[in-house]
Amino acid sequence: MLLIYTGSYPDDKCGVGDYVYNLNQEIKKNYTVNVVKLSLFELIYKIVSNRKIIKLINIQYPSIGFSTNKIAAFKPHVAFILAKLVGLKTSITLHEFSSLSKRAQYFLKIFKLADYIIFTTQYEKNIGEKTLFNSAKTRLIPIASNIPSCQKKEKKFDLVHFGIISKGKGIEEFIWI
């Protein structure tokens, strides 16, 4: 079983939640996955009751859910320490690592003990390897919503919709231009 700990999950307005949702959809095709959002008590319960079948705990960091207050900000760290204490393999998925403040990056040092450090872009992975993490532990799992650019094609027409055309709506000015 894979256990994912996150601060955000749909319907939260956070890209991390979307990432976790898409990751979960793919992984659960072949493995059992449990996603725990925010609750340390639920996470502790899942770890204690499933310790023998958990293959890996993945912690998503940071996310909007973990930024509600200073206590919430350290939930991923507590979860990580707990997982290590009971002997679980750990991975940390770091989102937008390069935009974290120096202070926030300082508190990431404990995650150097993780079995794997996952980045969502090659750019972030390169920065993480240069500044803090051993490249032997780093992995790349791209964001599913990052759709590659398509080749541009010449426009055949422009489409404009005015709604109901009536006096005073300004259609005259548009036509004049």
Image (cartoon, rainbow, N blue to C red):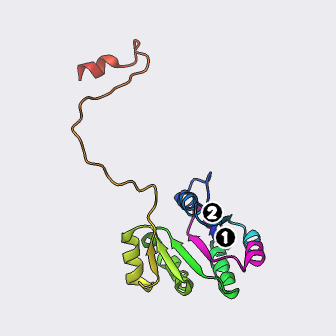
Residue at 34% in and 18% down: 171
Residue 16: percent from left, percent from top: 54, 61
Q: What residue type is disc 2 on?
A: Gly
- Mark 1 and mark 2 residues within 8 Å of each other at the beta carbon: yes
The disc at residue 125 is none
Secondary structure state at the residue bearing disc 2: helix
Residue 112: percent from left, percent from top: 52, 85
Left or right of 79? Residue 155 is left
Does the magenta portion include 128? no
Instruction: Tell me where the magenta segment starts and ends, as one range.
Output: 45-67
Does the magenta portion include 56? yes
The residue that mark 1 highlights is: 72
Left or right of 77? Residue 108 is left
Callout count: 2
The disc at residue 65 is 2
Of residue 117 and residue 31, the one placed in the foreground of this image is 31
Q: What residue type is disc 1 on?
A: Ala
Q: Quadrant of residue 45?
A: bottom right
Secondary structure state at the residue bearing disc 1: helix
Of residue 50 and residue 62, the one placed in the foreground of this image is 50
Q: Quadrant of residue 82?
A: bottom right
